[in-house]
Image (cartoon, rainbow, N blue to C red):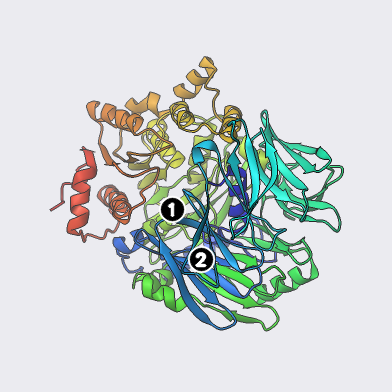
Amino acid sequence: MTPFFTKARKQVTCALLLASCGLLAAPDRAEADALDDAIAFVKQRDEAPLWPREAIARRAALKYVRMAPDGNSLAYSLQRGTISELWLYDITRNRHSRLFASKMVDQFFWSADSRFLFLESTQGIAVVSLHAPEAPAFLVNLDNEADELFYGIDPTHPHAALVSTQTADKQGHDFFRITPEGEKSHLFSSSQYVGEFLPSGPGDSFFVVRIKGMVTELVRLDSSGEKHLLDCDLGTRCRLIGFSSDSDNLFMMGAFGEDLVGLYGVDASTGEATLIHRDPTGTFDLEWVIMNHDTNTPAATGYKNDHTAFYGLTADGYSALKHLQSASSAKQLFLRASGDLSRWLVVDATGMRPDISVYTPETGQFVRPLADILAQREPAELAGINQASAPRIPVWYRVSDGMRQQGYVTLPLGHDPATVPLILMPHGGPWTRTDGAWHTQAQFLANRGYAVFEPNYRASTGFGKDYTLSANRDFGDGRVQQDMIDGLNYVLSRGVGNADKLAVFGHSFGGFSTLGALSFTPDLFQVGIAGAPPVDLSKSLKYFSTRERSPEFKMRLEHFKKLTVDLDDAADVKRIRSQSPDAHWEQVSQPLYIWAGGKDPKVSVLNVRDYALRLREGGKAITLIEEPSAGHSPNQEIQREAYLYMIEKALADHLQGRMDKSLSEKLARHLKRTITIDENKLGADLP
């Protein structure tokens, strides 16, 4: 298991297929005429061919791809059913080789010298040598229940991983460096929970971020003891990025008392933080940092803005980004670089599947090494889907209390947007955001003939601390829900959507918002679709907190009190419950469709089922699909296809959109097993 703080850092630096970045220049925030241009564009296009539902539901073949630090190889994993195949692409020889296949491996990480791949699974850490790739060796078992964790790769050692194991007395943890030979070197011990740590050199000096009460503290440990450098509350959100021994400077992402997350240098002797880079537009949080590992200094920063943007911090970083910008017009790029910046991994995330390239600044050459392999494993319809994808446009608008907010509009091809049904689709979280990358559900809905609006309502992240905290705990029948309605009205005012044909669809917190939309604005929408919806945030938080016991979660739970509800305060619980859809279910008057996972660790299926039963007993038009083996989201392809069938059938029945009417025998059987309540007759046409 990877700890929360370290996992967040890995997601920033490594999870190439789950994020996207852009290039050097800062975009126009407002893009005042982009929506008008898109409206004119879709009117002139032919209607898109109807995409097969099964193709949209299929799992992507490519799971992860990582460039070796020396820039000479790519490691990538291909999904075949429940099995992950680990492959290697030799860039210099233009040769692919299959290393091995396993059901166990979740993630993989390059050693600093590019000679080994460390493999993370639920059991622990293994390693594979590129000289003997057919024989992975298991290194260490890690017990998740005992908070024994993998902390990533040691950047100061040629080939070592960083792990923790519980002490014999179970009162703390020992931290080790472990090599491919299984040699373990004890680094330090701690009775406090360590979120992340970073060796500062080959000796026994370390930067450690650990929990202290309701904050995290950064300390430096060495042979003389420990030195406190600074404290970070959850609002500061500080993360370790790298260390330069030449300047004795630690590089961190954080807000450090400001609104926006930026890149800071922290004096390793005094703890003084100095800003290095922040979004020049003053709007967006920092998302990515690219390090030059030859100099141990940051070379570039990346931001999720309306699309994405990178900024060079050094001459080599600036030069590479400038050439990339001139060679590509894509707005949704994710970039990683080799340790010396001599090669760049470029991921274009504008299509249904990311397009992978390797860019060499010295020659200006782009190579697409995975294109042929992926073409053999992806649906035959993929090329047509990408060619007929709908435009996705960022919009900025003011809500009714004057706050400026951002969202995205997706428009169907071949239609007058003013006449089509409009779907409000709030994102989950709520402490996340929707961005400009390909969005499967939005594109699926646009292909069926609907316009889609996705608001980044207050509470969304990525736009600064003030944007997030301005929600002021006012969820349910309150300010956050009103933001969504205000944004919807803005989109309607721009000539998108038929006001008499509105629907709302969301998953997780988006599902909660769907229930709220039907309860608090019962005459506005013709139908609602909710996936894994919390019916009451206090109930969900209580359920979640009984299943998660780690020290980091306890600290986050305290932060949730400031963001949502204090479960120890009866009056506060009463407040949030009185604003919840659960307390106002009787106001629902339009058809509602719900999807729930029987093994959801975040939202109790019992609460969802109870809510649906009350609606049925109250004579409401309610349908419930309950997937017994699913978690918070559908994870099997047949589950995803059933979810999509529910969405498109509900919208076709109530808003007359297009629908893929083909229905396999397997899908029909699955739907019959999982539709548990069906007042809307979702299953009426099943053979």
Towards the viewer: 18 or 167:
167
Can you give x and y, in whole percent of width and height, for residue 601 in the image? 42, 37
Label 1 sits on residue: 452
How far apart marks 2 and 1 lie (CA) works out to 17 Å
**Location of residue 25 in the rendering, given as x and y in whole percent from the top left corner:** 70, 65
Q: Quadrant location of residue 29?
A: bottom right
- Is any part of residue 656 visible from this angle? yes
Q: Tell me the number on the disc at residue 350.
A: 2
Query: Tag 2, which secondary structure?
Result: loop
Which x, y percent locates residue 494? Answer: 51, 53
Residue drawn at (54%, 18%), measured in percent from left and top? 568
Q: Secondary structure at mark 1?
A: strand
The residue at 72%/58% (across/down) is 156
Residue at horizontal 55 percent and vertical 34 percent from the top:
550
Visible residue check, residue 418 = no
Residue 283 horizontal/vertical position (percent)? 68, 50
| Towards the viewer: 384 or 114 | 114
Q: Which mark is residue 275?
A: none
In the rendered structure, the answer to whether residue 205 lies left or right of residue 332 reads right
Q: Amino acid at mark 1?
A: Val
